[in-house]
Amino acid sequence: SLNVYPNLPGTTDSLWMVYNDTTLADTFRFHALHDISRKLIYSNTDSAIVLAKKLERESLLAGEDKWKGNACILQGVAYKLKEQNDSAIASLNRGIPSLENAQHIQGLAATYTNLGSVYQRLGDYRTSIEFHLKSLALHEQKGDKKAQATVLTNIGLVYFDTKDFKLSLEYQERSLASAEAANDPAMIGRALGNAGIIYEQTGDYQRALELQLEALELRNGVGNWKDIGVNTNNIGVVYQRLKQYDKALEFLKRGEKICDSIGYENGRANAFGSM
């Protein structure tokens, strides 16, 4: 949701040097300030908001619509992280006219995706899906299969929350097709894992196991340990449903160990709670 532009090379200190060099073009300086805020968004969210507001003010004065819009995306994501949903929605909506003026399709798609995520959190599933579909249409316009796969999965997760497992599975399958077209093993693994959870919820435990094992094989190749830990836990849960308790304990212990090794407390707690 934040990768609207690739990062400029360099450290935070070197980015500050770029931003403070008033002989450079505004767009280059604003890119640097944007990247400083983005680097801080998880580690120091409040500072990231301060810098994103500074970027919004300065880009507005300079008439740089795309950077004003990007500043609003940063604020929206930061407020979302802080669970300040009203502020997140206001920030994201404030950026839309600037992004439209700049014809910044990727920024608009990121805005709609983030709005979809916030409305899902609020339980307004209809509005969430509307925004995700807007994002999907823009990615289809650009022909970006990887981004389409991500949005299709997100829509599937909203339908999962509404317990509409048929539609949820349909969107995960569409996501899988887009991910395969993009040759993106991480996204393929995500779609397979999500489909496995749906089959587990609907009682088809054997199919759920097949998909979760296939997802884990792909995720082992990608090397994202958080995904691997969660996937391993999910396989343990399916083995429990199949009453194969030795296998269940083996995978749940392995999942707990992986999550513990990377400091992922939620994953560790979920594994522990299922044992």
Image (cartoon, helix red, strand yellow):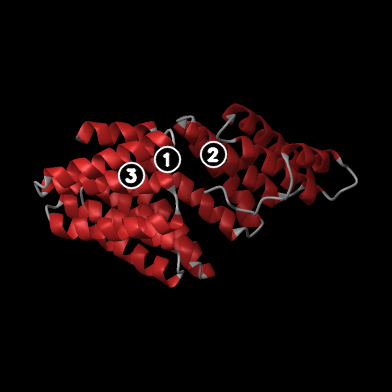
Which residue lies under the disc numbered 2?
76
Image location (x, y in percent) of residue 14:
79, 41
Q: Residue at x 50, y 63 (%)?
A: 138
Q: Residue at x 31, y 37 (%)?
A: 256
In the rendered structure, which amino acid carries the disc numbered 2? Gly
Image location (x, y in percent) of residue 198:
22, 53
Classify mark 3: helix, strand or loop: helix
Q: Quadrant of residue 104?
A: bottom right
In the rendered structure, which amino acid carries the disc numbered 3? Val
Q: Check if mark 2's residue and mark 1's residue have beta carbons within 8 Å.
A: yes
Residue in the foreground of this view, choosing between 53 and 43: 43
Which residue lies under the disc numbered 3?
230
Residue in the foreground of this view, choosing between 226 and 104: 226
Q: Residue at x 18, y 44 (%)?
A: 248
Residue 116 visible to an observer of this rendering: no
Q: Quadrant of residue 196?
A: bottom left
Q: Nearer the viewer, mark 3 or mark 2?
A: 3
Q: Earlier in the sequence, mark 1 or mark 3?
A: 1
Q: Crowdedness of circle 2 by 10 Å Cα count: few (<14), some, many (20+)? A: many
Which residue lies under the disc numbered 1?
118
Give the left or right position of residue 31, taking residue 113 as reference: right
Q: Check if mark 1's residue and mark 3's residue have beta carbons within 8 Å.
A: no
Task: Give the distance between the C-alpha atoms of the residues marked 2 and 1, in whole angstroms.
Answer: 9 Å
Quadrant holding the C terminus: top left
In the rendered structure, which amino acid carries the disc numbered 1? Val
Classify mark 2: helix, strand or loop: helix
